[in-house]
Every structure is written in C-alpha cells, then in structure tokens.
Image (cartoon, grey):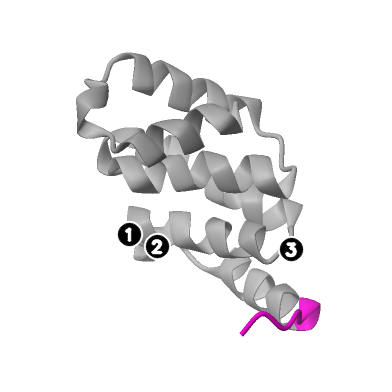
C-alpha cells in the first residue's frame, strides 16, 4: 500500500484505452480516474477517453459521489476538460443538492 509504480498505471491505462467503456458502470469510471489522481498518476489519453464517454453516456446515470469523484480526479490530476466541467456544472444546476452529501458538494466545488 502506498508504493508508487508508474509502470503499473501505464499498463492499466493502456489496457483501459483499448476497451469499450460501455462495459464500465458509472461508479467504475469514476473509480478509475480517482485512483489515478489519488496515486498522482496521470494519463491524458485515458482521462480524455473517460471524459468523452461520460459526456456521451450522460450525467443522469451518476450518483453524487461518482460525479464528485470524477471532477475531483480531473482537477487533482491536472487534466483540463472544459467540455466535461461545463456539462457537470450545467447538470448540477438542475439538481436538488439535498441529495448530495456535504463531502460530495465540497469535492465538486473544489474541483472548479
């Protein structure tokens, strides 16, 4: 636990990039980018593929934690994706934020 292994993250990213992301549930997508960001590993191609897929999939399929983890991960990893962030902002404006736990709200707003 806690040991850096950039080669492992590169291998995993290269593998995920080849997959059809429809095989991932929304929480799985958020977990992938969260794990990369948490480990201070970034892969612009992976993050772009995930962002494009999330936008295509639509944000209604994400629970508040998954949504906050995605934007937190992009911000933490330094991966800019204005289209994703614009989509998340527009989506959140339509939501009743009472369904968000305080941690999800703070993580989301921190990312912006």
Helix, strand or loop for the magenta stretch, by majority = loop
Mark 1, Cα crowd under 10 Å, few <14 / some 14-19 / many 20+, is few
Are the two marked residues, 1 and 3, in contact with CB atoms closer than 8 angstroms? Answer: no
Task: Tell me the magenta residue range.
Answer: 1-7
Q: Please, is residue 66 above or below residue 41 in the view?
A: above
Q: Secondary structure at mark 2?
A: helix
Q: Earlier in the sequence, mark 2 or mark 3?
A: 2
Q: Please give the count of numbered marks on the rendered protein.
A: 3
Q: Earlier in the sequence, mark 1 or mark 3?
A: 1
The mark found on residue 86 in the picture is none
* Residue 18 appears left or right of 96: right
Q: Position of residue 64 (x, y in %)?
A: 31, 40
| Residue occupied by mark 2 | 28
Residue displayed at 65% across by 40% down? 75
Are the two marked residues, 2 and 1, in contact with CB atoms closer than 8 angstroms? Answer: yes
| Residue occupied by mark 3 | 41
Q: Secondary structure at mark 3?
A: loop
Query: Which of 37/55 is in front?
Result: 37
On whether residue 3 falls in the magenta region, the answer is: yes
Query: Which of 70/16 is in front?
Result: 70
| Residue occupied by mark 1 | 25
């Amino acid at each position: 636990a806690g040991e850096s292994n950039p080669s492992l993250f590169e291998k995993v990213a290269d593998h995920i990039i080849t997959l059809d992301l429809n095989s991932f549930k929304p929480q799985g997508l958020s977990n992938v980018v969260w794990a990369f960001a948490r480990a201070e590993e970034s892969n612009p191609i992976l993050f772009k593929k995930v962002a494009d897929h999330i936008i295509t999939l639509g944000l209604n399929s994400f629970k508040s934690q998954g949504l906050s983890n995605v934007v937190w991960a992009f911000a933490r990893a330094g991966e800019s994706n204005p289209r994703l962030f614009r989509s998340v902002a527009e989506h959140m404006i339509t939501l009743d934020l009472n369904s968000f736990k305080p941690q999800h709200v703070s993580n989301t707003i921190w990312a912006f």
